[in-house]
Structures are given as structure tokens and as C-alpha cells.
Amino acid sequence: MAAVDGGEVDHLAGERATAHFDVDAMKVAWAGSRHAVEVNDRMARLVASDPVFRKDTRTMLSRKELFKDTLKKAAHAWKRIVELRLTEEEANLLRLYVDQPGYVDLHWGMFVPAIKGQGTEEQQKKWVPMAYKFQIIGCYAQTELGHGSNVQGLETTATFDPNTDEFVVHSPTLTSSKWWPGGLGKASTHAVVYARLITQGKDYGIHGFIVQLRSLDDHSPLPGITLGDIGGKFGSGAYNSMDNGVLRFDHVRIPRDQMLMRLSQVTREGKYVHSDVPKQLLYGTMVYVRQTIVADASKALSRAVCIAVRYSAIRKQFGSQAGGPETQVLNYKTQQSRLFPLLASAYAYRFVGEWLKWLYTDVMQKLEAKDYSTLPEAHACTAGLKSVTTSATADAIEECRKLCGGHGYLNSSGLPELFAVYVPACTYEGDNVVLLLQVARFLMKTVSQLASGKQPVGTTAYMGNIQYLMQCKSAVNTAGDWLNPAAIKEVFEARALRMAVNCAQNISKAPSQEEGFSELSPDLLESAVAHVQLIIVTKFFEKLQQDIIGHGVKEQLQNLCNIYALFLLHKHLGDFLSTGCITPKQGALANEQLGRLYAQVRPNAVALVDAFDYTDHYLSSVLGRYDGDVYPALYAEAWKDPLNETVIPDGYQEHLRPLLKQQLKFSRL
Ligand SMILES: CCCCCCCC/C=C\CCCCCCCCCC(=O)SCCNC(=O)CCNC(=O)[C@H](O)C(C)(C)COP(=O)(O)OP(=O)(O)OC[C@H]1O[C@@H](n2cnc3c(N)ncnc32)[C@H](O)[C@@H]1OP(=O)(O)O
Ligand SMILES: Cc1cc2nc3c(=O)[nH]c(=O)nc-3n(C[C@H](O)[C@H](O)[C@H](O)COP(=O)(O)OP(=O)(O)OC[C@H]3O[C@@H](n4cnc5c(N)ncnc54)[C@H](O)[C@@H]3O)c2cc1C
């Protein structure tokens, strides 16, 4: 019962008793190791027990109060990290459980990685220790008012002046104003700024520069620098804790050695020198962050699902016969068919996120050894998985809100704020459509190379089996046949390959490759999604091959894996049928099997969300409470609303009383 925050009666005890597996062992499978369970639990409790980290009234704060509260929490978190001498792992988890977006996310998540990835050793030695001690606060200033997706279209300039050995950073147009960077508006003292490098009269394109923005004495903007917040954002509370900012430069001078020079350099004389590395490494910080966003998708999704599953087990509607008990809404097949695929997706994203982290580390090690061959694969996987998991998670959080009926719409359910915080993940760090088109481009290149006999590797290795996959027919005969991993993998591979090959063939009929790509882009998106879904399904199956300990754990994960795959098959039935991978009968059998799997999950559902091991503080939801004591909590929460501070509302005297006293009368009546 590690996740209990309070509550004396466990209203979900009956649900927990029906589980067919060892929940503690499932916690290990979810977290990755026993150590991970322990450290997560310890950090979550540390945060939950500290009054400074309370967040129950967050949605009622004004923007200014919310921002100040975020500064307070960030400073307090840092104090605790220093006092308790937390490790980097512990500190990261503590920040996660504080659960309030703020400048620290960009400082640690992008500013520091950008310097580490693109700075020389000397630059890292100078800047990273200052950042680690919070002597400076940094952000990642790439996007401008006029351009975000099109990084090559950015307009800010950094022109080298050999007379003074400086760069002159300038915003030549309104649209070149930096716009969106988190932490920029009010908190950051420094930024990694992306600007067009101009030297000896030539434009060398986008490069990164470290620029000081504010005084380290009084925090005022330095001369030539205009700074501010870009304004309120979607939802109450939510992402409004972040000071997304605007920044303009008026011929601001910085020393030459503040250009990040690991990938390319400008000499004292102003000569541009590009190292022997692919220029795409400039985008390395984005690849790093996309990988972390995939891991975060499983967190956000599991959180929403935990709330919806627990509440669905408590909530009862209809079904009472002769005074008997009403039906738990979790028993309705429609509720199960909407909710259990989301539960399965949370597990699927968790495991694919784990794998992506491994891939990223592996690629980084290869890059260190000057082997750049896996860079395109890393880009396609991070871009594709970021896109598919964030889009599905944003939709799923909204579905969980609906699954909780009317109460899901209350802020106290935790779901509206979670949605509002989460939904920009579909846009930031690369718009999801733009990123899928990058995957499609990678797929088209891979297909075109098949003809020349080049054997695809990594996540596209299946394409090498083209002779078979283009003509195979699924052998599934009964619903039970869909439990065979090979049967599922075969149809997912055939679907992805056939869709990619169809696109490639249609593009080749266009007057030019570029025109064909543009014309076919809606189909290319679907092709990219099919490829990415195949990766997620495959990685789930691979996870099941690993040593999974604990009574019943593997069986539960097998069920969830099958649900994830068959749910996708059902949802994208059109793809599978139109590419001839399966017959309508086989599609119906998959759906039949899906229904059986839902029935197997039902007694385990509450225990499967308990395995996420979230504290009530982190969930921040009266509906998702561990003890299931929903109604008293809902009732009590309502009275905390500022509207209930007085019995008679403000405005009664001016606006309600005159109306009720009929002092304003229609002359005709
Ligand atoms: C209830 C409350 C809950 C609270 C919860 C709190 C929890 C906390 C929540 C939130 C925490 C906050 C965390 C928030 C973090 C937000 C951070 C957001 C930061 C940003 O958004 S930074 C800005 C990001 N910007 C982008 O991503 C821009 C997207 N655009 C691009 O990436 C590129 O421009 C492009 C890829 C689309 C195109 O680039 P371009 O140079 O034009 O390239 P192409 O011609 O298309 O391709 C050329 C060639 O390069 C290859 N390539 C492209 N990119 C990469 C890459 N990254 N790596 C490797 N290779 C790459 C491409 O494939 C081509 O290859 P080819 O020539 O075909 O072989
Ligand atoms: C909450 C939040 C935090 C952010 N934090 C940061 C930060 O810290 N630092 C930073 O630098 N930036 C940040 N950003 C900016 C973010 O990275 C960009 O907004 C994002 O990359 C999308 O770019 P855009 O705004 O230019 O969208 P656009 O590219 O203008 O997208 C508009 C529409 O056009 C479509 N579109 C664009 N190009 C194509 C194409 N080639 N083919 C088909 N359709 C296309 C898109 O799909 C979308 O529907 C943040 C944004 C948000 C919302």
C-alpha cells in the first residue's frame, strides 16, 4: 500500500482483492528496477509531505500569484536538493513530483544539454558548473514570432566583427523576435540563442550562441535587450506557471567565444571552419528532449488513466434491480473498451520510452566514436515516437475526462489542468505533423534504397523482408489466433511496408519528387504513423521476452500488449483491409478477442493502476484518490472555491439585488 496518503477506509479494497498478480512486482516492471521504485517512492513522499509543494488551490491563483508560487517552489526544491545532498537522479525526480512547469525545466532540460552537446570542452568547463550551481539561469531561445518549425528560416543575426573579436546579435525584423522560449520572460539570466552566423560577408546559417540577458546584480535586462512574457495561455493554472518569453536584440555584442563551437568555429580572423561532423548535430538538443518527451507521455497518460480507472470502480449508475446494488461504471463494456486500451497504451509508452532512452544513449556513444550512421534512425525514432505518443496522450487525457462524466470537468478531478498542461506537447519540440513528415521522408528514402539492394537496419529492418511482406496473407482463423505475437507482428509489418511502398510508388508518378511528396503528404502521415505503431508494438513484445519476475505479472503484461496491438488494428482497420493484410472476417475476430481480453483485465484494472505507484499529491485528483473516498472529497473541495468565501456573492448589491427588486422595469410590462 505504498501509495496511500491518508484515508482510513479503503473503498477500493474489494477491487484490489480481485487482482491476479503481485502488484509490488508490477511496480518493479513499470519503474524498471527495484531501485527505481524505491527512489521514486521516496521522492514522491518527500514532495507530498512538504507544505510548500501544496498545489490544491493552484487553479484559483491569478497569473502573478501562480508565477510567484512557481518561483517559490523552484527555490525551495533547490534548497531541499542541496540540504539533503540529493543525487542527480533524486533531484530530477523531486522536480518531477513538484509537478509545476517552470523555468527550471528549460534550464536543466535544454540550456544545460545544449551547452553540453554543442559547446567545446572549454566552453562546458566554463558554463556548466555555473549552471549547475544556479549562479546563472538559462533557457533555449530558438523559436521566433515568424518561424518555429522551419528552423532554417530563423532571422536573428549574429555578425562577426573582427575589429573587436565579437559577434553582434541583432533582431532585424518584428518576426525575428524570439517568441515562446520557456523561462525567458522573467527568470533567465542567460539563453542559448539560435541565430544566423554571418562572417566575412557570408551567411552560414543557424548556429547557437550563449547570450547574457539580465544583470546578475539586479536582474534588469542588459543594454540593447528587450524582454517580456508573451501572455496568458490555455487553461487555468496549467502551463501559465511558465514565463514563455519574447526577446529582441538591438546590436548586442558578445565575445566570439560565446558561439557554441563544438560543431563549427569562427577564427580570430573571422574565418568559418566546419568540423568533420554532420551539421544536423546542431539539432541534437531537440533529439534529446524528444526522447524525454516520450517518457513523459507514459507519465501523463498513466496519471489520467489511474484517475479514470479508480473513479470508474467507485462510480455507480443504473442496474439496480429490486433494491440491489447499482452497476459500477467500470463494468460497462463501453467504459472498458474506451478505458482499457488507454491503460494498455500507458504501459506500451512506458516500455517504448525505456527502449528509446537506450537507443539514444547508444547513438550518443557511437557519435563520440565518430560513427554517425545511426543518426537518421535516431532522428526518425525520436520524431515519430514523440509525435504519436503525445498526440495519443493528449486525446486520451480528454477521453479520461469524459470517462469520469460531469465530475471529470471539475478542476478538482485534476484532468482539466493535466490536459491543459499536456496538450502543447503536440506542438512544442516540433509540431507533430511536421515531425511525422520527417519520419515519412526517412521511410521514402529507405524504400528507394531497397531497389539498390541496400539492407535496411534497426527499426526498418522489416522492410528487407519485402518479397514476403508485400504478398503475405494472415493465417488467423480463430479469435484465439490473434494471441500469437508472430501473427500480430506480421500484419503490422505488412501494413507499414505496404503503405510506405504505395506512397513511394505514387510519388514516383509525380512530375518531381518534391511535388509528389507534397501531394501525397496526408497519406505519408498515415504511413509514418503505421511505422511508428509497429515500433511500439514490437518493443512491447520484446519487453515480454525479458526476465519478468513476480506472480502473474507477465500474464498481465501479455494481455495489455495484445490489447494495445488489437485495439490499434481495430482502430485502423481500414489500413489493414485496404492493404490486403487481413480479411474483414479476421478483423472481426480481432475485435472478438479484444472483448475477451477486456474481461480479463477487468478484475485487475485497479491493481494495474496502483502499480504506477502515484501518491495522491502527485495525482492531485479527488476522483483518483487511492482510498476511493470520492464523494466527501468532492464535497469538501467545492467549499474551497473563492466564490464560497462569502455566502452572499460580490456583485449582489450592484447587479443581482436591483434585478430581483425590479428596480429596472420593462416599460411595456
Ligand atoms: C496538472 C499539472 C501537471 C503538471 C505537469 C508538469 C510536468 C511538466 C510538464 C511540462 C514540463 C515542461 C517541459 C516543457 C519542455 C518544452 C520544451 C519545448 C522547447 C521547444 O519547443 S524548443 C524548439 C523546438 N523546435 C522544433 O522542434 C523545430 C522543429 N523543426 C525542426 O526540427 C527542423 O527544422 C526540421 C527537422 C523540421 C526541418 O529541418 P531542416 O534543416 O529544414 O531539415 P530538412 O531539410 O527537412 O532535413 C535535412 C536533413 O536533416 C535531417 N534531420 C532533420 N532534423 C534532424 C535531427 N534532429 N537530427 C538528425 N537529422 C535531422 C533530415 O532527416 C534530413 O536528412 P536527409 O537529408 O533526408 O538525409
Ligand atoms: C508551450 C510551448 C512551449 C515552448 N517552448 C519553447 C522553448 O522553450 N524554446 C523555443 O525555442 N521554442 C519553444 N516553443 C515553440 C515551439 O517549439 C514551436 O511552437 C513549435 O516548434 C511549432 O512551430 P510553429 O509555432 O512555428 O508552428 P507552425 O510551423 O507555424 O505550425 C502551424 C501549422 O502549420 C503546419 N505546418 C508547418 N509546416 C508544415 C509543413 N512543412 N507541412 C505541413 N504542415 C506544416 C503545422 O502542422 C501546424 O498545423 C514552445 C511552444 C509552446 C506551445
Image: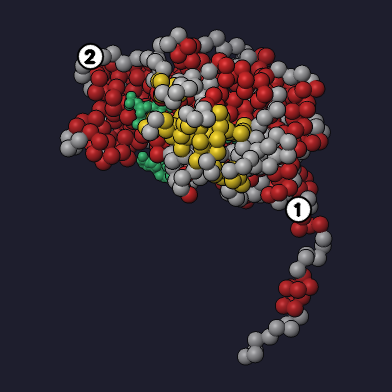
Residue 489 locus on image (x, y percent): 38, 20
Residue at left offset 22%, top offset 14%? 453
Instruction: Give whichever of 400, 550 is nearer the camera.
Output: 400
Query: What amino acid is found at the position of numbered circle 1 in the picture?
Result: Asp
Q: In which quadrant of the rendered view does residue 419 lie?
A: top right
Query: What amino acid is found at the position of numbered circle 2 in the picture?
Result: Gly
For marks 1 and 2 on the same chain, the one whose residue lies earlier in the sequence: 2
For disc 2, the marked residue is: 453
For disc 1, the marked residue is: 641
> Left or right: where does residue 574 sit relative to residue 361?
left
> Left or right: where does residue 226 sit relative to residue 272?
right
Residue 602 locus on image (x, y percent): 58, 31
Instruction: Give whichever of 256, 277 is nearer the camera.
Output: 256
Instruction: Give whichever of 267, 558 is nearer the camera.
Output: 267
- Extreme bottom residue here? 668
Label 2 neighbour load within 10 Å: few <14, some 14-19, many 20+:
few
Instruction: Give whichever of 438, 284 is nearer the camera.
Output: 284
